[in-house]
């Protein structure tokens, strides 16, 4: 039987932290049939607790699929938790074969808008940034190949619940795109990105101060980033020191472009578009993207294009515009590091 947990306290360290079992302090409140996580719409897969080999589902009074960021809505509106063992997770009788779109991106490139369009005009259920997939990137080095594959398969099945979905993970999940493609070749694959300097400017402003430890404990921050972006860890080891902000951003941008190219080389039919393309002719880009995904041409895009798809979050246009720009960054250093990393990637 699955365990019902009463939520005593919420303890997430900062809003954009990757979801984890320490986000909630809970007390046992009884047992329930594991299948309740499929039959009750208020329950959704939040994270894995790998140390105890359990999957944690939150109960919310709102649908997190309608939120710009799934993991934030789950946390903010959680009222209780249901814990399933890994065996119970794998045995869940999810009906139907998962299908839809994996929407990968570098972030800060219009991906939330595209996910909204696919959900509202493409008839797909939206799952925007489910952190259980982000966790799998961090757990991958600790898992055997078969266990990583089985957990990935079960998590996507539960996130989909037999519905056609658009799953837009955090940018880091491009590290697992090869596995998602192998397990779910029926999904369409899309990758969005942005010119590196423009992306870095937007990233620096949007995520300024997103982790309080950036200033107080930069070593721990880069340790965490190294688990999400392995190139950060490798470049830091090679340099023998903490990386500069320019080097970290360059590693992220190059690593994610490289993973997208690798996915295409593995045989995935990958649709790519840039933020600059979306700005110049959004209807043409969205029309081509919908066609790639096997969806009818979208109509009624004006409303979607006019609104901020991240409104109400700390990454909305109004929130990022109000945030201090900070000290800025060395654009020449970023450009130089991007070039160095590409040379290494091509060797």
Image: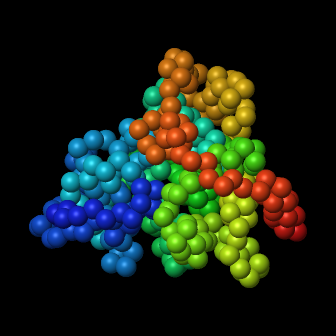
Q: In the image, what residue occupies the spot 77% across and 78% down? A: 239
Residue 132 seen: no
Nearer-the-camera pick, 92 or 215: 215
Residue 28 place in picture, x, y as percent:
15, 70
**215 to 164, vertically: above or below:** below
Q: Is residue 242 left or right of residue 80?
A: right
Q: Quadrant of residue 180?
A: bottom right
Residue located farthest toward the left when viewing the structure as drawn: 30
Residue 264 place in picture, x, y as percent:
73, 51
Residue 242 seen: yes
Q: In the image, what residue occupies the spot 84% across and 68% down? A: 344
Q: In the image, what residue occupies the spot 74% across and 82% down? A: 240
Q: In the image, what residue occupies the spot 85% across and 64% down? A: 340
Residue 207 place in picture, x, y as percent:
56, 53
**4 to 140, vertically: above or below:** above
Q: Quadrant of residue 251?
A: bottom right
Q: Is residue 318 left or right of residue 10?
A: right
Nearer-the-camera pick, 65 or 279: 279
């Amino acid at each position: 039987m699955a365990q019902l947990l009463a939520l005593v306290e919420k303890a997430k360290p900062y809003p954009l932290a990757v979801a984890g079992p320490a986000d909630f302090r809970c007390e046992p409140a009884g047992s329930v049939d594991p299948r309740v996580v499929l039959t009750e719409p208020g329950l959704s897969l939040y994270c894995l607790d790998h140390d105890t080999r359990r999957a944690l589902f939150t109960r919310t009074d709102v649908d997190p699929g309608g939120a710009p960021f799934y993991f934030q809505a789950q946390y903010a509106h959680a009222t209780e938790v249901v814990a399933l063992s890994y065996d119970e997770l794998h045995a869940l009788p999810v009906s139907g074969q998962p299908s839809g779109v994996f929407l990968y991106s570098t972030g800060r490139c219009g991906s939330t808008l595209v996910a909204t369009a696919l959900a509202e005009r493409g008839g797909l259920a939206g799952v925007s940034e489910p952190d259980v997939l982000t966790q799998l990137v961090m757990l991958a080095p600790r898992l055997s190949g078969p266990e990583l594959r089985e957990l990935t398969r079960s998590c996507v099945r539960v996130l989909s619940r037999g519905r056609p979905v658009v799953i837009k993970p955090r940018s880091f999940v491009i590290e697992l795109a090869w596995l998602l493609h192998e397990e779910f070749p029926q999904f369409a694959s899309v990758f969005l990105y942005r010119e590196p300097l423009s992306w870095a400017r937007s990233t620096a402003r949007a995520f300024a101060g997103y982790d309080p430890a950036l200033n107080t404990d930069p070593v721990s921050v880069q340790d965490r980033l190294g688990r999400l972006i392995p190139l950060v860890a490798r470049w830091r080891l090679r340099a023998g020191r903490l990386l500069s902000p320019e080097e970290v951003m360059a590693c992220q941008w190059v690593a994610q472009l490289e993973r997208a190219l690798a996915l295409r080389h593995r045989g995935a039919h990958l649709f790519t578009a840039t933020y600059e393309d979306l700005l110049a002719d959004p209807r043409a880009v969205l029309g081509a993207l919908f066609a790639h995904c096997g969806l009818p041409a979208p109509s009624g895009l004006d409303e979607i294009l006019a609104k901020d798809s991240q409104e109400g979050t700390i990454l909305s246009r109004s929130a990022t515009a109000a945030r201090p720009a900070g000290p800025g960054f060395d654009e020449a250093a970023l450009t130089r590091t991007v070039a160095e990393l590409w040379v290494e990637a091509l060797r």
